[in-house]
Image (tube, grey):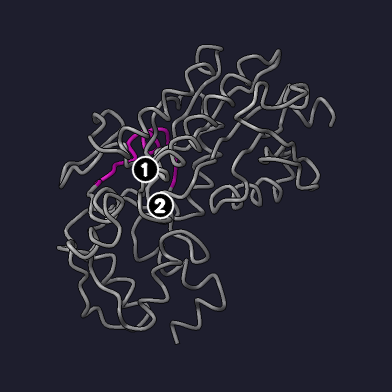
């Protein structure tokens, strides 16, 4: 890799996830040089580097990371994948906290560190806040997820102390047809079995996948942006309205409401802190910096998501 390529290059962890894969594809389409960090042995794809955050050092040869301009860390076990047993809570914590610490320490030791480190976080840091409008100055909330996010963000401090600009991307629900929450919802709604969760009055902070990718690139390129940043669309929506819109676009009814007690019985604390929790996020930092969302309201985002894939598009017929 030439010196010029490195100066434009990106370091990316979590490239196999929903957001990471989309970001990788966008950077490749822009002819950006991308070094992918992969767990265990390298997957053989050009530009991939094996790392193990549990070892010291995580990478045998740090020189492969020298001179890159941007680092993005998106690794972490899926919060909504299953019930939060004690063992899974440890996995959720280790997959975020330990990896962020390892990467931040590694970047801090480089002779030519990146200018900026964008680290994934979540609006779950605010906890269950009802109708309160939450910007980046709002205090963290209570609960396992809020505590996890707070610790997760703190682990990037070694990079910040080394002079690297750090951005904490507090992500909302990412809307995409082939992954994440929407992909899990579609089969149920296609059958006409979808509906609000509990009262449906809880606020849902969301962001279209395309806007999430663009926001990462925007934050990386904007020197005035640092610290916590809400990666959410300007118009959060209540759960009842979101489910109504999705069913309407699929030409299906919404007659089934899932009781809160049933969700708690099935999923325990995970349901309480994710499915039933209310975060009304405001992307104040992105808006003040001039970021232009392509999808500001949920209808536009859902229409785009449902139309971008042939299999999903067939549900509209």
Residue at the right extreme of this rendering: 2
Q: Is residue 140 left or right of residue 304?
A: left
Q: What residue is rendered at 43% in x and 54% in y? A: 174
Residue at the bottom extreme of this rendering: 317
Label 2, on which residue?
A: 207
Q: Quadrant of residue 62?
A: top right
Q: How many angstroms separate mark 1 from mark 2 (CA)?
A: 30 Å
Crowd rating for badge 2 (residues with CA inside 10 Å; few <14, some 14–19, many 20+): many
**Magenta span includes 284:** yes
Q: Nearer the viewer, mark 1 or mark 2?
A: 1
Q: Is residue 246 left or right of residue 143?
A: right
Q: Which mark is residue 317?
A: none
Task: Establish if 161 lies above or below 81.
Answer: above
Q: Which mark is residue 86?
A: 1
Q: From the top left corner, tell me how far across and down residue 76 is, in percent.
A: 50, 42
Q: What residue is rendered at 63% in x and 38% in y? A: 12
Q: Earlier in the sequence, mark 1 or mark 2?
A: 1
**Magenta span includes 177:** no
Task: Establish if 13 lies above or below 7.
Answer: below
Quarter of the rendering occupied by the N terminus: top right
Q: What residue is rendered at 65% in x and 19% in y? A: 113
Q: From the top left corner, tell me how far across and down residue 38 is, in percent.
A: 68, 41
- Bounds of the magenta segment: 279-292
Q: From the top left corner, tell me how far across and down residue 296 is, in percent.
A: 36, 54
Q: What residue is rendered at 31% in x and 76% in y? A: 247
Quarter of the rendering occupied by the C terminus: bottom left
Crowd rating for badge 1 (residues with CA inside 10 Å; few <14, some 14–19, many 20+): few
């Amino acid at each position: 890799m030439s010196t010029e390529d490195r100066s434009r290059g990106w370091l990316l962890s979590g490239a196999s996830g929903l957001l990471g894969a989309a970001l990788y594809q966008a950077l490749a389409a822009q002819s950006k040089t991308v070094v992918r960090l992969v767990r265990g042995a390298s997957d053989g794809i050009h530009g991939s580097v094996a790392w193990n955050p549990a070892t010291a050092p995580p990478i045998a040869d740090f020189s492969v990371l020298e001179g890159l301009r941007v680092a993005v860390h998106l690794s972490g076990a899926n919060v909504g994948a299953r019930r939060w047993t004690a063992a899974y809570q440890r996995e959720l914590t280790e997959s975020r906290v330990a990896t962020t610490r390892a990467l931040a320490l590694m970047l801090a030791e480089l002779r030519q560190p990146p200018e900026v480190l964008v680290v994934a976080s979540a609006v779950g840091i605010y906890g269950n806040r009802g109708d309160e409008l939450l910007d980046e100055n709002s205090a963290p909330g209570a609960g396992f997820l809020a505590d996890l996010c707070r610790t997760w963000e703190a682990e990037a401090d070694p990079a910040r102390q080394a002079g690297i600009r750090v951005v904490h991307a507090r992500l909302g629900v990412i809307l995409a047809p082939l992954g994440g929450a929407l992909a899990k919802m579609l089969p149920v709604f296609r059958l006409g079995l979808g509906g609000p969760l509990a009262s449906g009055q809880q606020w849902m902070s969301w962001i279209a996948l395309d806007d999430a990718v663009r926001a990462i690139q925007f934050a990386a390129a904007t020197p005035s942006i640092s610290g916590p940043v809400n990666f959410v669309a300007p118009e959060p929506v209540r759960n009842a309205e979101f489910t109504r819109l999705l069913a309407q676009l699929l030409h299906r009814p919404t007659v089934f409401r899932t009781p809160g007690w049933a969700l708690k019985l099935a999923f325990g604390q995970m349901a309480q802190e994710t499915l039933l929790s209310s975060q009304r996020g405001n992307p104040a930092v992105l808006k003040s910096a001039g970021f232009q969302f392509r999808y500001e309201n949920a209808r536009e985002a859902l229409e785009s998501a449902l139309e971008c894939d042939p299999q999903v598009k067939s549900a509209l017929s």
